[in-house]
Image: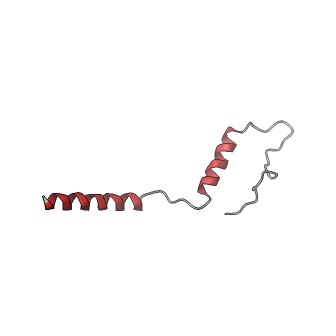
Amino acid sequence: MQFLIFVLVASAVGITIVLVRNRPRTGMDASIDEFRRGLRAIAPGPESGETGDRSDEQGAGRSG
């Protein structure tokens, strides 16, 4: 019985290590950038008078 418990615990630890090491790396601003990409995807296209440049967008000059 103890051997079975040991094998289950060792398997759980091994699976946890594999999952943590293989998760996608994300920066602090990753969710903000993903949200902004989603907004741009659903935004209407540029009108005939617009150039498509979004320099007036809030945070457009943010570096990171």
- On-image quarter of the C terminus: bottom right
Q: Quadrant of residue 39?
A: top right
Examine the rendered structure and indicate whether residue 62 appears above or below residue 50: below
- The residue positioned 79% from the left and 48% from the top of the image is 53
Q: Where is residue 20 in the image (x, y as percent from the top left)?
A: 41, 60
Examine the rendered structure and indicate whether residue 46 appears above or below residue 54: above
The chosen color scheme is secondary structure
Q: Where is residue 1 in the image (x, y as percent from the top left)?
A: 12, 58
- The residue positioned 25% from the left and 62% from the top of the image is 10
22 or 51: nearer the eye? 22
Q: Residue lying furthest front in this view?
A: 1
Q: Number of callouts in the render?
A: 0
14 or 2: nearer the eye? 2
Q: Where is residue 11 in the image (x, y as percent from the top left)?
A: 26, 58
17 or 48: nearer the eye? 17
Is 10 left or right of 61, judged from the image as shown?
left
Is 17 left or right of 29, judged from the image as shown?
left
- The residue positioned 60% from the left and 53% from the top of the image is 31
Q: In which quarter of the image is residue 16?
A: bottom left
Q: Quadrant of residue 46?
A: top right
